[in-house]
Image: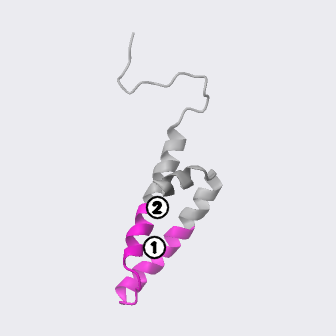
Amino acid sequence: MAQTEELRTRTDDQLVDQLAELKREQFNLRFQAATNQIEKPSRVREVRRTIARIRTLQNERTRAPKDPKSPARSAGGAKE
């Protein structure tokens, strides 16, 4: 997906800024939808999914190992 790859190239600060902007837009879209003034209803879905993509990417970055030389822990449990 082109949008996901574009998000991956952004820094953490840029992602935080974009997330705040999208949340503001989502808030405004909810009010427009409630008052039947929304011009493009599909934008609600786009914004919601983009927010999810950003949160997923932030979660992946926080869970990634900090030191690239250290071995990654296996999800299979402890081994001898």
> Looking at the image, is mark 2 or mark 1 earlier in the sequence?
1
In front of the other: 3 or 49: 3
Q: Residue 37, image x and y in percent?
A: 40, 90
| Residue lying furthest front | 2
Q: Which amino acid does label 1 sit on?
A: Gln
Mark 1 Cα-neighbour bin, 10 Å: few <14, some 14–19, many ≥20: some
SS at circle 1: helix
Residue at 45% across, 73% down: 26
Span highlighted in magenta in the image:
21-49
Residue 32 forms part of the magenta stretch:
yes
Name the disc covering residue 51, or none.
Answer: 2
Q: Mark 1 — residue?
A: 26
Q: What residue type is labelled 2?
A: Ile
Q: Residue 36, image x and y in percent?
A: 35, 89
Q: In which quarter of the image is the C terminus?
A: top left
In front of the other: 17 or 4: 4
How many numbered marks are there? 2
Q: Main secondary structure of the magenta part?
A: helix
Horizontal side of residue 43 vs 22, given as left or right = left
Residue 79 in the image: above or below residue 33? above
